[in-house]
Image: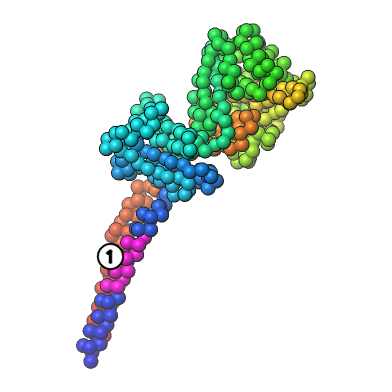
């Protein structure tokens, strides 16, 4: 009887164990198939570098048009390649997972060399990404997917989401692509980060010299970025004529100043006619909570929310090395001025090269960005605008591209507002120069030994104890 009971318990335990193992295997197969079918995945990195942002996801949910994304490489090479390729691959998968309107395809040009003959007007090659919707097309080269260090040899950030979401917005937008001309001839710096942002958001970028050329009549926007030398009278006449546009207006001039360039009397007199003023020195904030690292890297306040749609106090726009600017009047002779960015009551101005601030320099009335609009009231009301930013540095480098700051999103919103284009998509690059997890080596070792050694030993010990107790019943 005792032997029969022992056999009975043993058979039951064996049956439960076998059923448990079978259940685990079946569950693993089912979950694997569902994961493959629906693309289930979890990004465990601290900065979600394998996932796309909520902004992209929400944009995908609003898609009305079909979008085809073609990657010119075989899928296996991308999915099992280097860390950077896998990161790009996982980002791309997210687009079809979050929208039924998006189709993702991988085409290996070594096996299908004639495939690109369907696109005779496009210069396509391996690893390029083609985004299409209807008759609109956008090509993203592999090199454009990343940011590199100063040597150009080490990848520091991924722009996969930034470029792909921007391309989708470009090919699905009903808005006419605006043309921006970058003006040069006076020692200007290249606004590369700004123009890259604009290109990703349905702007065509060209450049020309004010000294030798008349301004492009097809351009709606012009950028004068950190001029180091003053403009002559002839160039200023070209600007006035272009802004007037034979009375039709509809033009926007953006002037970004560099305090280190010093006084530019001709340009400043021209801006004065529009009611705008540029002062000397740097703007500062005396309260350490209102500047970023250095007192002359002040956090701007959004003075006019019409040009800061969606911005909150937690969105930091840093006006680094900002030349104070101001308005000379509110309204005069068809001109109306507005302050877009200013600073707090603890702000003031220091001279160039000054490393410390004094209490008497705190004035609390410093501005960082101002706008003037000229309106002509004929059969139709026409308008042209001049925007002056005291800081050119605020729209270069990390303050433009990092998701820590809102500089890029803010200035893009200003461009869209002045161009009457409401749809704004600004995706920052993902920093890949930091570790992709935050656990210390000690924690890593603890978790590894815990799951691979300690837990199995505990389970085995419990099993032996249960078996011994049942054996002696």
Is residue 197 found left or right of 327 in the rendered image? left
Residue 386 quadrant: top right
Q: Position of residue 408 (x, y in %)?
A: 55, 32
Q: Residues within 10 Å of mark 1 (few under 14, many from 20)?
A: few
In the rendered image, which quarter contains the C terminus? bottom left
Q: Is residue 19 magenta?
A: yes
Q: Please identify the residue farthest to the bottom as the structure is shown.
A: 1
Residue 256 appears in view: no
Q: Position of residue 245 (x, y in %)?
A: 66, 18
Q: Position of residue 145 (x, y in %)?
A: 41, 34
In the rendered image, which quarter contains the N terminus? bottom left
Q: Please identify the residue farthest to the left as the structure is shown.
A: 3
What residue appears at the point 42 percent right and 40 percent down from the top-left corner?
Answer: 69
Label the magenta part by its dominant secondary structure.
helix
Give the vertical position of 109 relative to 14 (above or below). above
What residue appears at the point 30 percent right and 56 percent down from the top-left corner?
Answer: 449
Q: Please identify the residue farthest to the right as the structure is shown.
A: 332
Judging depth in this view, the residue of 370 and 384 nearest the camera is 384
Residue 232 appears in view: yes
Per the rendered image, the range of residues in magenta is: 17-31
Judging depth in this view, the residue of 451 and 311 nearest the camera is 311
Judging depth in this view, the residue of 154 and 79 nearest the camera is 79
What residue appears at the point 51 percent right and 29 percent down from the top-left corner?
Answer: 199
Q: Is residue 258 magenta?
A: no
Location of mark 1 (residue): 457
Residue 302 quadrant: top right
Residue 28 quadrant: bottom left
SS state under label 1: helix
Is residue 409 found left or right of 338 in the rendered image? left
What residue appears at the point 37 percent right and 43 percent down from the top-left corner?
Answer: 105
């Amino acid at each position: 009887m005792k032997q029969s009971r022992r056999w009975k318990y043993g058979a039951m335990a064996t049956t439960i164990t076998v059923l448990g193992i079978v259940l685990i295997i079946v569950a693993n197969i089912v979950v694997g198939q569902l994961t493959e079918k629906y693309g289930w995945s979890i990004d465990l990195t601290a900065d979600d570098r394998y996932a796309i942002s909520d902004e992209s996801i929400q944009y995908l949910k609003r898609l009305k048009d079909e979008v085809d994304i073609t990657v010119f490489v075989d899928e296996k090479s991308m999915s099992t390649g280097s860390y950077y390729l896998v990161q790009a691959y996982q980002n791309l998968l997210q687009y079809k997972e979050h929208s039924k309107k998006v189709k993702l395809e991988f085409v290996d040009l070594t096996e299908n060399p004639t495939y690109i003959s369907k696109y005779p007007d496009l210069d396509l090659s391996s690893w390029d990404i083609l985004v299409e919707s209807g008759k609109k097309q956008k090509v993203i080269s592999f090199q454009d997917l990343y940011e590199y260090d100063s040597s150009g040899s080490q990848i520091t950030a991924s722009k996969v989401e930034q470029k792909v979401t921007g391309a989708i917005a470009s090919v699905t937008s009903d808005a006419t692509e605006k043309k921006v001309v970058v003006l040069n001839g006076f020692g200007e710096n290249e606004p590369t980060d700004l123009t890259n942002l604009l290109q990703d958001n349905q702007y065509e970028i060209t450049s020309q010299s004010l000294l030798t050329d008349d301004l492009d009549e097809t351009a709606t926007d012009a950028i004068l970025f950190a001029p180091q030398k003053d403009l002559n009278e002839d160039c200023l006449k070209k600007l006035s004529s272009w802004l007037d546009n034979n009375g039709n207006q509809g033009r926007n001039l953006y002037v970004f100043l560099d305090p280190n360039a010093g006084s530019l009397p001709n340009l400043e007199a021209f801006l004065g006619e529009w009611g705008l003023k540029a002062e000397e020195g740097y703007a500062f904030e005396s309260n350490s909570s209102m500047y970023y690292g250095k007192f002359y890297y002040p956090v701007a306040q959004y003075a006019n929310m019409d040009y800061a749609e969606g911005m909150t106090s937690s969105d930091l726009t840093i006006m680094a090395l900002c030349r104070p600017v101001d308005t000379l009047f509110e309204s005069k002779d068809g001109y109306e001025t507005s302050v877009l960015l200013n600073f707090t009551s603890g702000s003031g101005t220091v001279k160039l090269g000054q490393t410390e601030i004094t209490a008497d320099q705190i004035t609390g009335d410093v501005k960082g960005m101002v706008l003037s609009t000229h309106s002509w009231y004929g059969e139709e009301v026409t308008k042209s605008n001049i925007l002056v930013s005291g800081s050119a540095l605020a729209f270069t480098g990390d303050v433009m591209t990092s998701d820590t700051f809102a500089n890029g999103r803010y200035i893009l919103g200003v461009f869209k507002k002045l161009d009457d284009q409401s749809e704004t998509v600004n995706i920052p690059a993902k920093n890949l120069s930091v570790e992709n997890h935050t656990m210390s080596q000690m924690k890593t070792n603890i978790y590894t030994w815990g799951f691979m050694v300690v837990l199995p030993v505990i389970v085995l010990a419990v099993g032996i104890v249960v078996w011994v107790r049942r054996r002696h019943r």
